[in-house]
Amino acid sequence: MAEKQRLLSGMRPTGRLHLGHYNVIKEWVRLCDLYDSYWFTADWHAITTQFDNTDSIRANRREIVIDWLSAGLDPEKCHIFHQSDIKEHAELHLLFSMITPLSWLERVPTYKGQLEAFKEKGKDIATYGFLGYPLLMAADILMYRPSGVPVGEDQAPHVEFCRELLRRFHHLYNCQVFPEPQPVFNHIEILPGTDNRKMSKSYGNFILLSEKPEDVKTKVWSMVTDATRIRKTDPGHPDVCAVYAYQGFFNKAEQPQICADCKAGAIGCGQCKKRLTECINDFLEPMRERRAKYEAQPALLDEIIDAGNTAARKTARETMGMVREAMKI
Ligand code: TRP
Ligand code: SF4
């Protein structure tokens, strides 16, 4: 049988995952059956924007792996590792830096946008490392010679940058080391935040995958509903209500009935939220159980990451052999 094609993706360990991330991990779980899959925590990338506050990175990269496992990622079916454990990423990044025109990096659309966004918050991230963000990402990707990179649409310019860079590498050294990786976009339904805006860490409008039952209750209770509804008998407008959107994700079977009852003024928002709280807690319960297992046995997590690192390092060493050979160094 032909060998499976390879996939690779990473996440910066900047905090625990929330419900909005769940569908991404669900997609990763599905892809593990089809591809030889590598998933990693991009801990060096996290430093680009928080070089002045690195205290949480180590803890976060473990937390994020626990979140992946809790959400159903099966370590038997993929390789899970930390970027900074595979030093070859740094070597490839350095070698690539020798052939990357500065102008390519300066014109990556996320570069100026992010600089500005941070400047508004009073922080200057115009470092050498931050400029090189897409280059380090290109090294992460090409190291594993994957055929695809599952990412959100926001990362498309980075994958395109990576493809341009590999063409330049092949041209300069007259070789064919890397297959051209395709972005694999996650076509997932987007869950809004509890305030009906985009679910985001900076808005504080999320529910964590590791949220405690009573905190789920508090957060659902604070959710934005149809503001024109004062009394239970007032006819509601479910389409403007975040609780209703969530019912579609976590309580699909009852959603049509809730819609009808809301419009008819036959259900109160309190009752509706109570039901949603139960449904979200039912959904999170198996994840809490898996999380508890990994929290109780840190060695189990170490073993998973050691195994992932070993597999990643093997591929990385093969690639670096090919790269050094091509560059004659
Ligand atoms: N830049 C990605 C993000 O912020 C994280 C990342 C780093 C990544 N290296 C990668 C994703 C390589 C895919 C492949 O989401
Ligand atoms: Fe929203 Fe439910 Fe209240 Fe209708 S009853 S406005 S769907 S919370």
Image (cartoon, rainbow, N blue to C red):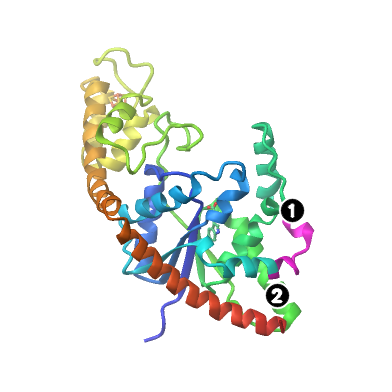
Q: Where's residue 186, x and y in %?
A: 45, 56
Residue type beneath disc 2: Phe
- Residue, x 37% and y 71% (percent of image)? 34
Q: Quadrant of the C terminus?
A: bottom right
The quarter holding residue 45 reads bottom right
Magenta part of the protein: which range? Answer: 95-106
Residue at the limit of the structure toward the bottom, as seen here = 1
Magenta stretch containing residue 97, yes or no?
yes
Callout 1–callout 2 Cβ contact below 8 Å: no
Residue 169's label in the rendered image is 2
Is the residue 266 above or below the residue 47 in the image? above
Q: Quadrant of the N terminus?
A: bottom left
Residue at the limit of the structure toward the top, as seen here = 231
The residue under label 1 is 107
Asked whether, in this view, residue 93 is left or right of residue 268, the answer is: right
Q: Can residue 240 be seen at all in this image of the molecule?
A: yes
- Residue, x 48% and y 77% (percent of image)? 314
Asked whether, in this view, residue 94 is left or right of residue 36, the answer is: right
